[in-house]
Amino acid sequence: RKEVEQDPGPFNVPEGATVAFNCTYSNSASQSFFWYRQDCRKEPKLLMSVYSSGNEDGRFTAQLNRASQYISLLIRDSKLSDSATYLCVVGGRDDKIIFGKGTRLHILP
Amino acid sequence: NAGVTQTPKFRILKIGQSMTLQCTQDMNHNYMYWYRQDPGMGLKLIYYSVGAGITDKGEVPNGYNVSRSTTEDFPLRLELAAPSQTSVYFCASSYRNEGWKFFGPGTRLTVL
């Protein structure tokens, strides 16, 4: 199993729909989890941290499933501006931070 | 705060040339990193630093060198540029290693 694995997509979703994607990780000792957003030809920017109890920020909900070793990102009422690549980031106790290759999301008008 | 700044934004090098990619942060972060991102690929860690005077190799350090003489600056040096080093280079900084990172805008490097 790859250290951090994401479906590369693209996910083509109509505006206003709900979309979700997962990210699996191989190191059961991983301690920190994040979702970053990267626009085309731009730097990654933190979207949200992922907490054990799950967390929500507006239209975005992140969840962690330690038993199955995956994190998820749910986007509700998707906007055209949500079109981007979403990077899953996992950190372990050994200070190793691993970036996934990203999932491309296209919101269609 | 300017955050993390990188220069240059773009550069074309010939094989065998050398150059330094500059990175500066004004957030007083101890941790700084250099990543490269190839098309369709994830970020690969080149080098990182946990504080001034301390640097360490990441996943893909070959062909690169770094120094960290101050908290603010973390330059990346390419001594003998090769086509395989064509990539987008991102510098990042963070307060803690396991915490989230601020990224600079990137340097697009092409080696011909």
Image (spheres, coloured by chain):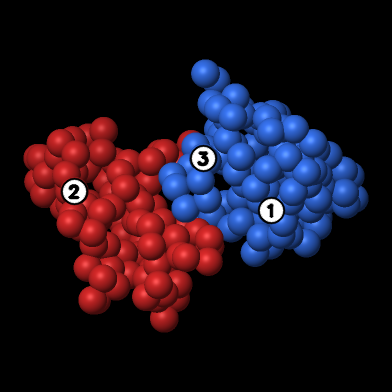
Instruction: Give residue A37's quadrant in the image.
Output: top left
The secondary element bearing badge 2 is classed as strand
Q: Assess whether mark 1 and mark 3 are in contact (beta carbons under 8 angstroms).
A: no
The residues bearing labels 3 and 1 have C-alpha atoms spaced at a distance of 17 Å
Question: Residue B65: x percent and y percent?
Answer: 81, 50
Q: Chain of mark 3?
A: B
Residue pointed to by mark 3: B95
Q: Is residue B39 visible?
A: no
The residues bearing labels 2 and 1 have C-alpha atoms spaced at a distance of 32 Å
Q: Residue furthest top?
A: B1
The secondary element bearing badge 1 is classed as strand
- Indicate the colour of chain B: blue
Question: Residue A26: x percent and y percent?
Answer: 40, 76
Relative to B78, does residue B108 appear above or below in the rendering?
A: above
Q: Residues within 10 Å of mark 1 (few under 14, many from 20)?
A: many
Instruction: Give residue A24's quadrant in the image.
Output: bottom left
Q: Which circle marks residue B47 in the picture? A: 1
Q: Residues within 10 Å of mark 3 (few under 14, many from 20)?
A: some
Q: Chain of mark 1?
A: B
Taking the image as shown, residue A15 lies to the left or right of residue A97, namely left
Question: Residue B8: x percent and y percent?
Answer: 70, 29
Q: Is residue A32 visible?
A: yes
Q: Depth-wise, is mark 3 or mark 1 nearer the camera?
A: 3
Q: Which circle marks residue A55 in the picture? A: 2
- Indicate the colour of chain A: red
